[in-house]
Amino acid sequence: MQRKTFLKSLLLTLPLRWTGLTPTLSTQKQMKKSILKKSDLRFKQAFPGLQGVDIMAHAYPIEPILVFTEYHMDKPVFGPHPHAGISVMTYMLPDSKQGFINRDSLGDFSYIEPGGLHISQAGKGMFHDEFPRETGVDTHGFQIWINHKETDRWVTPKSIHALSPEIKEVQTADYTVRIVHGTFNQVHSPYQLVTAVNILHVFLNPNQSILLPADEMAFVYGLNGTSTINNTTVKAQTLVNFGQEGNEVSVHAGEAGFEFMYCTAKPLHEPIVYGGPFVTTTREQMAITQQRLAHGEMGELAPYHYIRWF
């Protein structure tokens, strides 16, 4: 009996890595995050044919996400352009009236359908181009820039494409969660970028609640309906940034339900140098990146000439 007691005591004092166990949410103390800042935002016209709600890391605590923009776009705006040092995601919302044609210097030519997505993991540099398939018909979605840590700035570029049915979903009687990237409730997106980030599109049924695991950085962005978070009312185009402390976020929907985006991640806590479509860690890296562009080392992408391919 004494020997069993001794072994039990020894087991309880061993670090988890020694016993082969790993901590889970059920063994961690749950602590609700507090609201750091609430911002009621609105659409602004950026260019003819493009309206957006722009959320930038230099103005809001959202890093490793650098740009988080909800857009309505009905005509080509940008044309072929390069990116380097980051990953650029286009997530087309399921309610969009149509999608984007996507092209890049790696050879991709695809259609981002409503509910689908495309990611350009730009790394050391690539060109891409995205525009509505039919001019004059609205597209509705998000463009999201995801930061790379310094050791991943210049990874080999690649394209990731997912059709709407390929976006993993978790459904209960209370909610539907589309896992745009990352993990929720032990369900994982089939693709994984070099930067770990959870991006969820949540449909919360009327008068229901959802508890969302949270990392150091977390925010909620409202799309439709209303909700209550920590006794604070949240509606469409409301951004709620949470403080660093705590590991969960609770959202309660109003009578009409609540549709929202939820993002959480660990910030990289590294210097950031912006240079238009490029992001680096140092000014020296930015100079090298611009030289690579000038020397044609990011490939090329000619302007699009319309072909009826669908």
Image (spheres, helix red, strand yellow):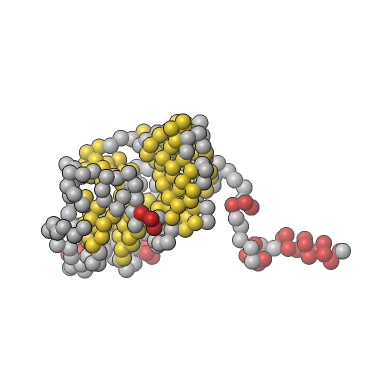
Residue 195, x across and y down, in percent: 41, 59
Image quadrant where one finds the C terminus: bottom left
The image quarter in which residue 73 lies:
top left
Q: Residue furthest front?
A: 310
Front residue of 1 and 175: 175
Relative to 22, is 261 on the left or the right? left
The image quarter in which residue 193 lies:
bottom left
Image quadrant where one finds the N terminus: bottom right
Front residue of 192 and 308: 308
Residue 274, x across and y down, in percent: 28, 53
Whether residue 284 is visible, yes or no, is no
Tally of numbered discs: 0
Front residue of 85 and 42: 42
Q: Residue at x 49, y 48 (%)?
A: 171
Q: Residue at x 40, y 53 (%)?
A: 180
Relative to 53, is 199 on the left or the right? right
Whether residue 62 is visible, yes or no, is yes
Relative to 194, is 302 on the left or the right? left
Q: Is residue 119 above or below residue 60?
A: below
Relative to 142, is 6 on the left or the right? right
Q: Residue at x 37, y 39 (%)?
A: 223
Residue 241, x across and y down, in percent: 43, 41
Q: Residue furthest right?
A: 1
Q: Residue furthest left?
A: 305
Q: Residue at x 26, y 57 (%)?
A: 111
The image quarter in which residue 268 lies:
bottom left
